[in-house]
Image: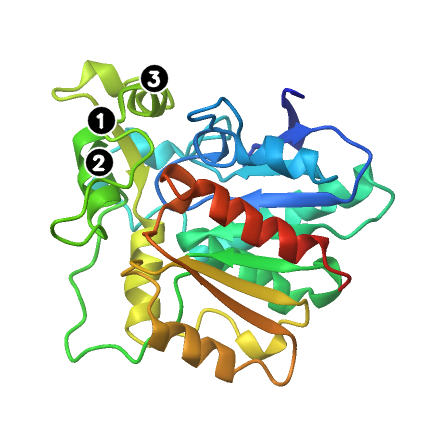
């Protein structure tokens, strides 16, 4: 299996892209709100094969972005200050520009080839916003468990601090929240022993805290609150790339109503909805990972 190498994206903040080299067309992976690319598209469960490996086997060259504040990319100085001293770090507008920088880097490296983009959860907001703003720069767009526009409620939530602390147990509880009562865990590693240790290692100070915990930007949570209260962070009708929405049937963060509203904004463009059985919001970390890979890879292999 081909191992990844890190490449530096020009500009500020300093960004790192993971690259699994191949001769095939490029595909860019965009992670979600709380963990970086190495723990998502690059993570090997079970038989030791990652989603990146599966994409390589399907004929793609794989790239994966770590947003600022995650993985190997630069962390904001606000992480070193009291969380109440700044607004939420890492909002979608900044993240969208980082997606744009990553795409520009890939196109320069690959003779101007526009990449396909796979994005997960909150990462679908900046990825879709970039696709809407730069329609010729994205070949296909796969939105996995996307956070989509809702009408909103009567009461807005309280403002969030710059960052928050998340423990491995916090992650485990969140990862399990979509599993219906009476069903066995669908996590590929229910105790998160290996994954959790690797996740704590993404923050050099995590194990100095009691209990060990990672500092995570609150910008994504603020974006999700905004979108679910009716804030339109991008114009879905402007996305010209063929677009796949893929989600687990138990995914509470991406509902049938959410997807129907998104599809209604398609303006006649190619939009596809795939709902996979026995899956939650994090199917790339669940026992149904191969169904997810198969659905996305099949979409990417179609002639756009």
> Under tag 3, what secondary structure?
loop
**Percent x, y for residue 7?**
66, 27
Calculate the distance from the C-alpha at mark 1 to the C-alpha at mark 2. Answer: 7 Å
Q: Quadrant of the C terminus?
A: bottom right
Model colouring: rainbow
Between 151 and 243, the one nearer to me in the picture:
243
Q: Are marks 1 and 2 in contact (CB under 8 Å)?
A: yes
What percent of the width, then of the height, locates residue 24? Answer: 79, 39
Q: Residue furthest right?
A: 111
For residue 204, which numbered disc appears in the image? 3
Q: Are marks 3 and 1 in contact (CB under 8 Å)?
A: no
Image quadrant in which you'd find residue 180? bottom left
Label pair 3/2, CB-CB below 8 angstroms: no
* Dot in front, 3 or 1: 1
> Marks 3 and 2, Cα distance to the nearest angstrom?
21 Å
Of labels 3 and 2, earlier in sequence is 2
Q: Nearer the viewer, residue 36 or 205?
A: 36
Q: Which mark is residue 54?
A: none
- Near mark 1 (Cα within 10 A), the count class, few <14, some 14-19 or many ≥20, is few
272 relative to 180, above or below = below
Determine if residue 12 is in view: no
Query: Local crowd at mark 3 within 10 Å, few (<14), some, or many (≥20)?
Result: few
Disc 2: which residue: 172
Is residue 30 visible in the rendered image? The answer is yes
Answer left or right for 53 relative to 201: right
Going 48% across and 48% down the picture, which residue do you hit? 291
In this rendering, the answer to whether 83 lies above or below 205 is: below
Q: Which residue is mark 1?
A: 191
Query: Who is closer to the viewer here, 237 or 21?
Result: 21
Q: Of helix, strand and loop, which one carries label 1?
A: loop
């Amino acid at each position: 299996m081909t191992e990844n190498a890190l490449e530096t994206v020009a500009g500020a903040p300093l960004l790192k892209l993971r690259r699994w080299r191949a001769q095939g067309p490029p595909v860019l992976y965009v992670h979600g709100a709380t963990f970086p690319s190495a723990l998502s598209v690059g993570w090997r469960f079970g038989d030791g094969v990652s989603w990146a490996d599966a994409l390589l086997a399907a004929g793609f060259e794989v790239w994966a972005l770590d947003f600022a504040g995650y993985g190997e990319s630069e962390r904001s100085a606000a992480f070193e200050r009291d969380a109440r001293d700044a607004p939420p770090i890492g909002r979608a507008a900044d993240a969208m520009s980082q997606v744009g920088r990553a795409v520009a880097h890939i196109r320069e490296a690959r003779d101007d080839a526009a990449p396909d983009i796979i994005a997960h959860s909150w990462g679908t907001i900046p990825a879709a916003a970039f696709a809407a703003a730069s329609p010729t720069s994205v070949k296909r767009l796969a939105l996995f468990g996307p956070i989509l526009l809702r009408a909103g409620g009567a009461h807005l939530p309280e403002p969030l601090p710059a960052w928050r602390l998340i423990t491995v147990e916090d992650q485990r509880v969140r990862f399990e929240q979509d599993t219906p009562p009476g069903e066995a865990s669908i996590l590929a590693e229910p105790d998160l022993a290996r994954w959790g240790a690797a996740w704590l290692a993404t923050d050099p100070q995590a194990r100095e805290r009691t209990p060990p915990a990672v500092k995570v930007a609150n910008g994504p949570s603020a974006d999700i609150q905004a979108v679910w209260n009716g804030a339109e962070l991008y114009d879905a009708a402007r996305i010209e790339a063929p677009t796949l929405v893929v989600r687990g049937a138990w995914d509470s963060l991406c509902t049938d109503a959410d997807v129907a509203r998104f599809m209604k904004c398609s303006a006649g463009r190619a939009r596809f909805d795939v709902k996979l059985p026995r899956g939650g919001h994090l199917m790339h970390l669940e026992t149904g990972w191969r169904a997810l890979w198969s659905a996305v890879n099949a979409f990417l292999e179609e002639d756009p």
